[in-house]
Image (spheres, rainbow, N blue to C red):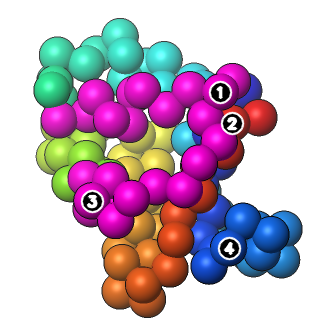
Amino acid sequence: MAVKLYIANEFKEIKQKTKSIVFREEIQEYLIKTKNRTMPKSLFLLKLDPYRTHRVLEKDEVRELIEIAKLLKDKYEEIEINKFADELLKFCSYAIENDVNVFALGD
């Protein structure tokens, strides 16, 4: 299971858009196990439920994801976490710079 983040102006455009990122369950579980490294800053990311999340994120939430990505890059040396953090940082920065919505959808 995973939470997929999409960039689109409207929900109906999601399938047409190519920009997306996957927050895999394995990464989420690892971050939960090691959350003392990033708490409380990473709480928003960890609360994205791969079973129930289905919404557009507020601009402040996207900015928070940018800060979380930076924090993950600083606190973790694991390749998979750093790769995800890099992707998340670029993804969310693009959304803010281009004033487009980020949709979070669980599987």
Amino acid beneath label 1 = Arg
Residue displayed at 44% across by 76% down: 95
Whether the magenta-drawn stretch holds residue 21 is answered as no
- Residue 100 at x, y = what percent? 50, 80
Could you tell whether 78 is left or right of 36 in the image? right
Mark 2 or 1, which is nearer the eye? 1
Provide the residue span drawn in magenta.
41-64
- Residue 70 at x, y = what percent? 21, 54
Amino acid beneath label 4 = Glu
* Rendered view: 107 above or below 86: above
Question: Disc 1 designates what residue?
Answer: 52
Kindly state the secondary structure of the residue where label 1 is placed.
loop
Q: CA distance from mark 4 to mark 2?
A: 17 Å
Q: CA distance from mark 2 to mark 1?
A: 6 Å
- Residue 85 at x, y = what percent? 37, 51
> Mark 2 or mark 3, which has the lower sequence index?
3
Which residue occupies the foreground of this view, 11 or 39? 11
> Mark 1 or mark 4, which has the lower sequence index?
4
Q: Quadrant of residue 92?
A: bottom left
Q: Badges 2 and 1: C-beta atoms under 8 Å apart?
A: yes
Can you say which quadrant of the picture contains the C terminus? top right
Q: Which numbered tag is attached to residue 106?
A: 2
Question: Disc 3 designates what residue?
Answer: 60
Label 1 Cα crowd, 10 Å radius (few <14 / some 14-19 / many 20+): few
Kindly state the secondary structure of the residue where label 2 is placed.
strand
Q: CA distance from mark 2 to mark 3?
A: 20 Å
> Mark 1 or mark 3, which has the lower sequence index?
1
Amino acid beneath label 2 = Gly
Question: Disc 4 designates what residue?
Answer: 10
